[in-house]
Image: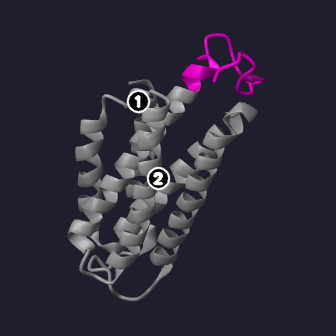
Amino acid sequence: MDDGTDKPLKTANRLHGDPDPQTLVERMIRVDHAGEYGAARIYQGQLAVLGDRPVGDTIRAMAAQEQQHLDTFDRLVVERRVRPTVLTPVWHVAGYALGVATAMMGERAAMACTVAVEEVIEQHYARQSALLGEDETELREVIDECRRDEIEHKTIGLDHLGADDGVDDSGASATAYPVLSQAIKSGSRLAIWLSSRL
C-alpha cells in the first residue's frame, strides 16, 4: 500500500531531464527482463549446436540459472505492471542466432560470447544496484543475485577460454576473439539502451 512515504531513488547524480525514480525503476525491470530473455535465447542457440558435447552440461547449467532470472523478471513485469520491450521479437531471433553462430565457430567462441555478454551485464547490474534507494531493497536483492550469477558465468567462460583440452574444432585460442568480443559487447550495450526505452 502506498502511504506517500516512499523514499526516492538516490538522486545525487540525477541531472535535469533525467527520468523520475518511478520511470527509472520501470526501465530497469524492462531492460533486465529483455536481457535475461536474450541470454536464455543465446544459450538455447549454443545448446542446439553444442548440446551433445561435454561442454553442453556446463552451458545447460548456466542456461538454467538464466531461466530462473527470466522467471523472476517475468513475475516483476506483471507485479509492477511494467510494459515489456517492444523489441522482444528481435531479441528472440538475435539471441538465438548469436548463440548458434558462436557455437558453430567452436566451444571457445561460444565461451568468448559468454564472457563478453556477462562482462557488460555485470557492470550494468552494478550500476542499477547503486542507483536503488532503500524503498527498493527487494529489487536490489534480485539484481545483486543475478549479478553474482553473471560473474560466475563469466568466470566459467574464462576458465574454458584458458583451457587447452583440444576439444575446440576451430583450433583457435582465446586471443583469436577480440573482434568478436568487442562486437558482442557493443551489441549488448546497444540492446540495453534500446530495451530500456522501447
The quarter in which the N terminus is drawn is top right
Residue nearer the viewer, 180 or 26: 26
Q: Alpha-carbon distance for marks 1 and 2?
A: 20 Å
Q: Residue at x 30, y 50 (%)?
A: 95
Disc marking residue 99: none
Q: Hey, what amino acid is under mark 2?
A: His
Residue nearer the viewer, 135 or 100: 135
Overall secondary structure of the magenta section: loop
Q: Residue 160 magenta-drawn?
A: no
Q: Which of the two discs, 1 and 2, labels the residue nearer the N terminus?
A: 2
Could you tell me which secondary element the residue under label 1 belongs to?
helix
Q: Please state the extent of the stretch shown in magenta in the rendering.
A: 1-24
Q: Residue at x 47, y 48 (%)?
A: 72
Q: Hey, what amino acid is under mark 1?
A: Leu
Q: Is residue 17 left or right of residue 171?
A: right
Residue 183 is at least partly visible in this image: no
Residue ID for mark 1: 194
Q: In this view, does 38 lie to the left or right of 120?
A: left
